[in-house]
Image (tube, helix red, strand yellow):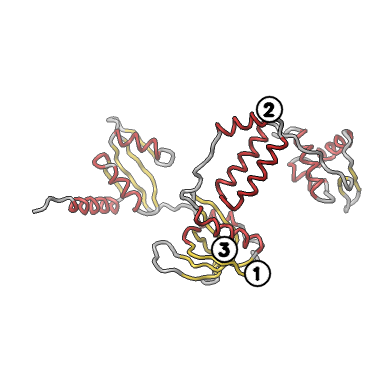
Amino acid sequence: MPSVATRLLSLIMLLQSRPSWKASELADELNVSERTIHRYMVMLDEIGIPLYSERGPHGGFSLVRGYKLPPLIFGPEEATVLYMGANLVQEVWGQTYEDAVTSVTAKLDNVLPDDLRQEVARARQSLVVSGLTARDYRPWEPTIHTLRQCIGERYCVRLVYRGLGRPQVTERVVEPYALTLQWGLWYLVGFCRLREGLRTFRVDRIQQIQASRDPFTIPRDFSVREYLERTMRFTPNYHVIVHLQPDAALQARERHGHWMEMTDQEDGSTIAQFGVANLDWVTGWVLGQGAAARVQEPPELIARVREAAESALKQYAPAD
């Protein structure tokens, strides 16, 4: 729970962000009662924060014009959060925000005292986050940069796009709504004028991109988060049951135990159960286990594994 000091600081920053606030608005922002807001105002006045209040239905609270919050002082954990946040932005966005990340960290280095900077450096060495993207997106950084600019300025983009498993490409005009990082891959969410509907495009499948000066407007009731939850939700089409010998079971538990349901057997083997959208990955996974894995369900997977195994065996059949 935030302390009173933290809420007072947040209150000052809210008052500084716009000319006037009603007590009810401040209460909603800080998740406290209006009575608590009035008590906080008395406390701010007692410590010398210049406040102005006006009663009535159109009244509210505001800071005296010209007042600015003094420079912030960060603790070790707060400074570490800022540095790590900057590093995460660079990890995810790459060159797009590289200059901004360099500028932010340089400013922090310049204002932090030596002892605090050393403490933060130790934390950064021991707390490392990397590998957030499933592939190297440096070749697509110009594409991401163009998309980010057009999203911010509300201009359409012209794409040459290659769909999943399709050798041919299509040219289309897209109203770019948002960029999202899902499962380590970048996606563009936007309204496709070619298909006349909302679509999701994988950034690394964009062959060419060109910014246009054709403006667009995002519908007021559109929520990117709701759209992603509705359209990119994993839907299992097959329920897989595989019997694993002890050695294979140990590896599967270490690598996939966070999403596979594992049921240990008395002989040390394990029954693994999980859902998949298609049988492509799981066919290769079962074959990779060799004789240590035996599919029990579904029949379609049993047939695919048998067919793949027979085909592989023919490749290594001895010559006549």
Residue at position x 59%, y 42% from top?
A: 87
In the image, 229 versus 186, the foreground residue is 186
Quadrant of res 173: bottom right
Mark positioned earlier in the residue sequence (1 or 3): 3
Going by the numbered disc 3, the residue's amino acid type is Gly
In the image, 284 versus 275, the foreground residue is 284
Going by the numbered disc 1, the residue's amino acid type is Pro
Q: Position of residue 127 (x, y in %)?
A: 56, 34
Q: Which residue is mark 2?
A: 115
Instruction: Give the spatial CA distance, label 1 vs label 2.
Output: 51 Å
Left or right: 114 with respect to 290? right
Mark positioned earlier in the residue sequence (3 or 2): 2
Q: In this picture, is 268 found above or below 276?
A: above
Q: Which residue is mark 1?
A: 215
Q: Position of residue 189 (x, y in %)?
A: 55, 60
Instruction: Give the spatial CA distance, label 1 vs label 3.
Output: 13 Å
In the image, 199 versus 135, the foreground residue is 135
Is label 1 or label 3 in front? 1
Mark positioned earlier in the residue sequence (1 or 2): 2
Crowding near the residue tagged with mark 2, few <14, some 14–19, many ≥20 C-alpha atoms within 10 Å: few
Left or right: 278 with respect to 304? right
Identify the mark at residue 190; answer none if there is no mark.
Answer: 3
| Residue at the left extreme, as displayed | 320
Residue at position x 50%, y 61% from top?
A: 201
Is label 3 or label 2 in front? 2
Going by the numbered disc 2, the residue's amino acid type is Asp
Q: Secondary structure at mark 2?
A: helix
Image quadrant in which the N terminus is located: top right
Quadrant of res 291: top left
Instruction: Give the spatial CA distance, label 3 vs label 2.
Output: 48 Å
Residue at position x 67%, y 43% from top?
A: 104
Q: Secondary structure at mark 3?
A: strand
